[in-house]
Amino acid sequence: MNKTAQYLRNIYKFPSMEDSQDFEKLIKLNLWTHQDDIAFYRDKERTTKCFTQMLNIKGKDSFIICNQVQQAWEVISDKSHPSNVIAFICDNAGFEFFMELCLADYLYTNYYATSIHFHVKHIPWFILDVTEADIHWMLHHLGKNADKYLQKMSTVWKEHFKTGRWKIVVRKYWTLPIGFTKMKEIDPLLFKMLEEPKVVIIIGDMNYRKLFEDKNLEPSTPISDALAEFHPSNVLLVRVMKSEVCCNIKPSEIEILENLNRNWMDSGLYGFIQFAPKPKVTCDCQGL
């Protein structure tokens, strides 16, 4: 985490010519954090190697099958948008969640969001799933770290949660054996919460699978069709592919991937950064 904190500090100290470039760096870091379940590692050397490889984000660009980060940035950077809330549907605890906090910090500090919502599970559906208790534990231990910058981050983030600028949202829906498309019917309050943000960032392979209900989709299916009944807001999907569920991939790209690696779908080598804008409401005014 010390290296990542330094990386974030350098982004603030030496920003790119365009904020979109720094945003893209942080999104890619969030993506590749999920390539390996780092929280399982007990070998310090292996963990350090993972971090070093992850920070080499430019070297991994060829493994991003679909990169629509700029489309997402156009919405996120729109400070005239009626909503200035960003929501995260979170995945793993540990370093993976720390990276989400870093991304949230960047968006909040640069006034691209005045409120951040973190949607977490009430129990660890899988062993690494982040819960509210995990967040408080992380903030506590960051405050005890020898790194002064991590201590400062802990203090600032605790204050954000205390004042309500950042919110932890816990709903049982995330651990039900139901995909996202039934949310409006089964948990209308949660669906309404997700209508508020200008962008909902959905992290991780398991959330991706639940979003599309583990359907055997044609990989070329447009993402707007695949989302079906779940489209409360603009949606940004950040996911390392570890299962066969996918959409919005051009047939020509599929052919290339098949030739490169027959197991490309579940190899954990490839990533998606996919953006789906909220459909515009149309009014059929004929006959009025």
Image (spheres, helix red, strand yellow):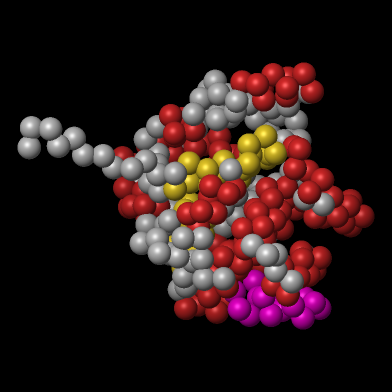
Q: Tell how many labels.
A: 0
Rendering coords of residue 112 (x, y %): 51, 66
Q: Is residue 71 magenta?
A: no
- The N terminus - image quarter: bottom right
Residue shown at 80% from the left, 77% from the top: 147
Q: Residue placed farthest to the left in the image?
A: 288
Q: Magenta region's main secondary structure?
A: helix
> Quick check: 68 above or below 250?
below
Residue 203 visible in the shown view: no
In magenta, the rendered stretch is 139-157
Quarter location, residue 156: bottom right
Residue shown at 55% from the left, 29% from the top: 247
Q: Is residue 233 left or right of residue 240?
A: left
Rendering coords of residue 36 (x, y %): 76, 45
Q: Is residue 153 magenta?
A: yes
Rendering coords of residue 283 (x, y %): 21, 39
Rendering coords of residue 90 (x, y %): 56, 52
Residue shown at 44% from the left, 39% from the top: 180
> Quick check: 285 above or below 154?
above
